[in-house]
Image: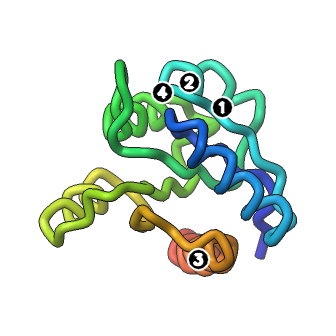
Amino acid sequence: MASLQKILFVEDDPDIQMVAQLALEAVGGYTVQICSSGAEALAVAEQFAPDLILLDVMMPGMDGPTTLAELRKKPALAQTPVVFMTARVQRHEVEQYLALGAADVISKPFDPMTLSAQVAAIWTKAYETRSR
């Protein structure tokens, strides 16, 4: 199985960016590329070539679901696992995100000490699903 190394994190809130980046890099040992908008993610994603994308749902301009749809149009990113991070985690909302093709959903607020482990578990599950 390939290892998870590079994470593209698309989030418009600078405080959440800082906490998640610290948690993912210091605790998880991952390389994290931060994007503050869907448009920025579309501009850098192919060149960064992430193993996994963490994507905020509610962002100004281009929301997470729209960003996901646009990322999927890029052949190099068509199979990259995407995880939505959101405070909107009612059952019907989570079902919607999964129906859009998300590998999973992490609820906000998240625990910085367990974020890396959550991401690793989702990555393993997504990779095993793709390998079948």
The three-letter code of the residue at mark 3 reads Gln
| Residue 84 x, y percent position in the rendering | 42, 55
Q: How far apart are the two marked residues, 2 and 1, measured between alpha carbons?
A: 6 Å
Q: Which residue is mark 4?
A: 38
1 vs 4, front mark: 4
Q: How far apart are the two marked residues, 3 and 1, measured between alpha carbons?
A: 22 Å
Q: Which residue is mark 1?
A: 45
Residue 18 drawn above or below residue 52 = above
N-term-proximal mark, 3 vs 4? 4
Query: Which of the two residues, 117 or 21, is positioned nearer the viewer here?
Result: 21
Q: How far apart are the two marked residues, 1 and 4, measured between alpha carbons?
A: 10 Å
Would you say residue 131 is visible in this rendering?
no
N-term-proximal mark, 3 vs 2? 2
| Residue 120 x, y percent position in the rendering | 67, 75
The three-letter code of the residue at mark 2 reads Leu
Q: Which residue is mark 3?
A: 118
Q: How far apart are the two marked residues, 3 and 4, measured between alpha carbons?
A: 23 Å
Query: Which quadrant is the N terminus positioned in?
Result: bottom right
* SS at mark 1 in the image: helix
Number of callouts: 4
The three-letter code of the residue at mark 1 reads Ala
Please tell me which residue is depicted at 64% across the width and 37% down the height of the picture.
76
Q: Quadrant of residue 40?
A: top right
**Could you classify mark 2 by the number of other residues whose Cα lies within 10 Å: few (under 14), some (14-19), or many (20 or more)?**
some
Direction from residue 131 to residue 12 in the image, left or right: left
Q: Which residue is mark 2?
A: 42
**Could you classify mark 1 by the number of other residues whose Cα lies within 10 Å: few (under 14), some (14-19), or many (20 or more)?**
many
Please tell me which residue is depicted at 44% across the width and 45% down the height of the picture.
56
Q: Quadrant of residue 4?
A: bottom right
Residue 75 drawn above or below residue 19 = above
* SS at mark 4 in the image: helix
**Marks 4,2: beta carbons within 8 A:** yes
